[in-house]
């Protein structure tokens, strides 16, 4: 799918959309821990190339289990280090055998003198692994304190660590990351975007049918972000929170209990992004059994289809409809893919007509730009409560 580059914003210094090296928003996002892969996607002793915010890196896991991130190419001839061999916690280039340790120092360079070993090194980036996810820090200086996700859930959620079902997941979406960041606070879209996936007469999994209604929300401005809470006379409203700059926390009813999720929208570049999520299903033993039974069949169902990104692209081309994917395990994501990938860019002045239901989205934009302005002016991001 072709995406047209966004027009120049009114104030380029305060645009959340461009996150490449040296951009204000790119520097801002790099000042936080960013998830880069699910732990299960990186076996011990393997290396892989990754791209984050328009930059390429090498990710590898030592034979002892520790994950490492380095610059993409060997300083000798710039051969991709991801093609190399993992030796302990070191990585050896496949071109001429130069080996680099976990601290970036050149440990061995066959046929070269000792002086070269002293002056050659690769850049390495701090990593942290928790909750089945590999995180990395791409900013300058020491990384900030890692977020206490369990404590945040106990304070603002339902205690994810106590849930009977815990899982991780990821998907790639062909649009700017910030579109998906805002979508977390757009509760008004659920009644229409997710109408199919919430219909139990058509789909096996999805939202509880009770969420398919137009809901007014209250907007709460927190120190760390914006929260949208649906206005209902019930004890457990849907709650969605964006934690700046690009994380979210969601509480929403499902057919077998309550889904609680912490997720990050991480730019690959300015035209695509990954979502990496840590999910808990608060359910009973019967719900857990149904979930596990469905998971056992999920791989076969997914194998029937191309990637969710490709499914959405086929719909946007008019070749398919959402009904063609009614039994797809990731139908909820395909619905969001279609809506968001079809938006192109949303920062062109005059094209949007924000209304009452967009009040949380508008508050987030204002807060993001305000915090970005503070960051550009020299205010450090600091440690948040989450």
Image (cartoon, rainbow, N blue to C red):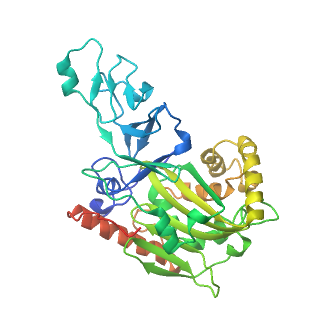
Residue 232 shown left or right of residue 50 in the figure: right
Extreme residue toward the front, this view: 64
Residue 69 location, quadrant:
top left
- Residue at horizontal 43 percent and vertical 67 percent from the top: 243
- Residue at horizontal 73 percent and vertical 53 percent from the top: 292
Task: From the viewer's side, name the closer residue of 85 and 162.
Answer: 162
Residue 335 shown left or right of residue 22 in the figure: right
Residue 371's x, y, as percent? Answer: 31, 68
Residue 111's x, y, as percent? Answer: 27, 11
- Considering only vertical position in the picture, is 104 above or below 320? above
The reply to whether residue 150 is in sight is yes
Residue 211's x, y, as percent? Answer: 67, 74
Task: From the viewer's side, name the closer residue of 367 and 249.
Answer: 249
- Considering only vertical position in the picture, is 198 above or below 30? below
Extreme residue toward the right, this view: 201
The reply to whether residue 185 is in sight is no
Quadrant placement of the N terminus = top right
Task: From the viewer's side, name the closer residue of 108 and 302.
Answer: 108
Quadrant placement of the C terminus = bottom left
């Amino acid at each position: 799918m072709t995406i047209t580059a966004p027009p120049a914003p009114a104030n380029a210094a305060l645009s959340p959309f461009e996150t490449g090296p040296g951009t204000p928003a790119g520097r801002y996002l790099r000042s936080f821990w960013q998830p880069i892969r699910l732990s299960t996607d990186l076996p011990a002793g393997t290396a892989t190339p990754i791209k984050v915010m328009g930059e390429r890196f090498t990710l590898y896991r030592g034979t002892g289990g520790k994950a490492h991130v380095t610059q993409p190419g060997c300083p000798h001839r710039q051969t991709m280090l991801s093609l190399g061999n993992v030796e302990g916690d070191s990585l050896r280039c496949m071109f001429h055998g130069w080996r680099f340790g976990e601290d970036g120092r050149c440990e061995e360079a066959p046929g070269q003198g000792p002086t070269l070993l002293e002056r050659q090194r690769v850049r390495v980036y701090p990593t942290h692994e928790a909750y089945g996810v590999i995180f990395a820090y791409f900013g300058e200086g020491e990384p900030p304190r890692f977020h206490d996700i369990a404590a945040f859930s106990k304070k603002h959620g339902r205690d994810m660590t106590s849930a009977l079902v815990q899982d991780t997941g990821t998907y790639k979406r062909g649009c700017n990351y910030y579109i998906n960041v805002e979508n977390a606070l757009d509760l008004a879209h659920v009644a229409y975007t997710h109408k199919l996936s919430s219909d139990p007469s058509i789909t096996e999994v999805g939202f509880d049918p009770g969420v398919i209604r137009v809901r007014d929300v209250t907007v709460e401005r927190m120190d760390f972000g914006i929260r949208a809470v649906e206005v209902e006379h019930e004890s457990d409203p849907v709650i969605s929170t964006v934690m700046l700059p690009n994380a979210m926390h969601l509480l929403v009813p499902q057919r077998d209990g309550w889904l609680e999720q912490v997720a990050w929208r991480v730019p690959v570049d300015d035209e695509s992004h990954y979502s990496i999520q840590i999910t808990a299903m608060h359910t009973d033993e019967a719900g857990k059994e149904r979930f596990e039974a469905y998971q056992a069949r999920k791989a076969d169902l997914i194998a029937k289809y191309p990637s969710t990104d490709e499914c959405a692209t086929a719909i946007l081309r008019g070749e398919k409809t959402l009904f063609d994917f009614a039994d797809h395990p990731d139908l909820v994501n395909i619905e969001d893919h279609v809506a968001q990938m079809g938006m192109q860019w949303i920062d062109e002045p005059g094209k949007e007509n924000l209304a009452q239901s967009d009040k949380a989205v508008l508050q987030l934009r204002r807060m993001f730009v305000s915090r970005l302005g503070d960051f550009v002016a020299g205010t450090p991001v600091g440690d948040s409560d989450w």
